[in-house]
Amino acid sequence: MVATRKTICFSGGVYPRIEDDLLAEAIAGKVRIFWHKQLIPLQLNTKERQEFEAAKSRRFVILRKGCRKNLSWAWSHYCENNALPPVILTPMKTSALVKMDLIAYGRLNAIGTEKVKCIASAALAPRVRRFYAGGVYNSVRVNLDESEAVAAAFYDIATEFKQ
C-alpha cells in the first residue's frame, strides 16, 4: 500500500502564512504546499531537522554543507509564526554569509541599522569591500570564526531595535 501525501494549494496576491501545525506536517513530508502551482520547499531530511531544532535555541539557523534551501524556507516560516527575526548563516571555507531578511518581521530603527553596520564592518572577511545593511535586508560576508557571534548579534539587534 502506498502512502499518499496531502496537498494544499494557496493562491491570491499575498504569500501564504503557514501556521506551525501545517509547517510541522510539511517539514515531516506529510503534506506538500503549493502557491500558484509552485511547490514551497519545506520538507527536511534528518540532518536538516536536527539543525532546525538546534536553531530554535541558538536563535539562528546554519546552512551547513549538504543542507538544502528547504531548511532556510522552513526557518523563515517558523520565525514569521513566532515573531522572531530570521537570521541565516551560510559557512564557506574561510568566511560565512550572514543574512537577516526582516520583510515579515518589521524594519530596524535608525539605531539598529547603525549597530548592524558597525558589527558588519568590524567582522568583514578579507577582500570583502562591501556589505548591505538596511532597515529591512542585511547581508554580510564575515570571517568564519566570527560568524556565529555576528549572527547572534544581528538577532539581538533586531529584537531590541525593531521599529
Image: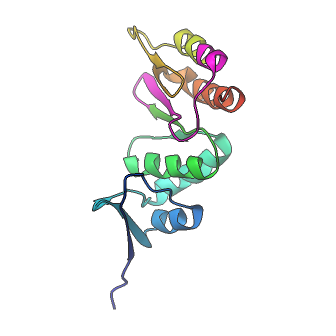
Q: Which residue lies most toward the bottom here? A: 1
Viewer-proximal residue, 113 or 53?
113
| The quarter of the displayed image where residue 122 is located | top right
Q: Which residue lies most toward the left here? A: 37
Residue range (magenta): 91-115
Residue 72 x %, y %:
45, 45
On screen, residue 149 above or below 117: below
- Say whether residue 82 is left or right of residue 41: right
Viewer-proximal residue, 9 or 22?
9
On screen, residue 66 above or below 123: below
Residue 25 x %, y %:
50, 69
Residue for point 63% across, 42% down: 84
Check residue 97 for magenta coloring. Answer: yes
Residue for point 43% across, 68% down: 29
Residue 17 x %, y %:
50, 56
Residue 151 x %, y %:
58, 29
Residue for point 45% across, 41% down: 63
- Say whether residue 93 is left or right of residue 21: left
| The quarter of the displayed image where residue 116 is located | top right
Viewer-proximal residue, 48 or 38?
38
Viewer can see residue 68: no
Quarter of the image containing the N terminus? bottom left
Q: Which residue lies most toward the right here? A: 160
- Say whether residue 41 is left or right of residue 112: left
Check residue 49 for magenta coloring. Answer: no
Residue for point 55% across, 54% down: 50
Viewer can see residue 29: yes
